[in-house]
Amino acid sequence: VQLQASGGGLVQPGGSLRLSCAASGVIFRINGMGWYRQAPGKQRELVASTNSLGTTTYAESVKGRFTISRDSANNTIFLEMNSLKPEDTAVYFCRLTGKNWIDYWGQGTLVTVSS
């Protein structure tokens, strides 16, 4: 399973970005997909996730600003990020939890929020 994340970039505070993550390869089952981020000097943290039932989970810091969505037919997830803040600056990684609850990670895409 390979995950390809894209959509990162430089944006001003208050701006928006949309991240995409496409999964490819032999995928027997997807138990969940999600977005994580890691800022310099900090641990990787959950940003948003969605499971096979469509249930979504968000970090408190992004609730009301970020929206995760999924295109199941194409094994792709998206992260719509609005009202971005400098503290949202990080490398964003996508994660897929597949059969037997094995996790796969993408390579990360850098989001920089700065004026």
Image (tube, rainbow, N blue to C red):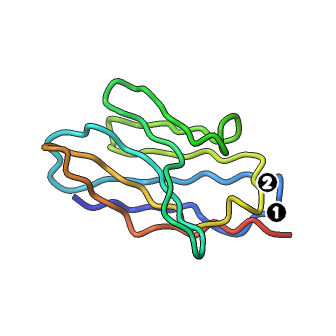
Secondary structure of the residue carrying numbered label 2 = loop
| Mark 1: few/some/many CA within 10 Å (<14, 14-19, 20+) | some
Q: From the viewer's side, name the closer residue of 107 and 85.
A: 85
Say the numbered circle drawn on residue 57: none
Q: Is 12 on the left-hand or right-hand side of 87?
A: right
Please state, as top left, top right, bottom left or bottom right, where the C terminus lies in the image.
bottom right
Nearer the observer, 109 or 41: 41
Instruction: State the CA–CA distance, disc 1 to disc 2.
Output: 5 Å
**Is 96 on the left or on the right of 47, as rendered?**
left
The location of residue 102, given as percent across then percent down, is: 19, 51
Which residue is denoted by mark 1 in the rendering? 12
Residue at image x 70%, y 34%? Answer: 64
Please, what secondary structure does the residue beneath circle 1 have? loop
Which residue corresponds to mark 2? 15
The x and y percentages for residue 44 are 48, 62
Q: Are marks 1 and 2 in contact (CB under 8 Å)?
A: yes
Percent coordinates x, y for residue 80 in the rendering: 61, 44
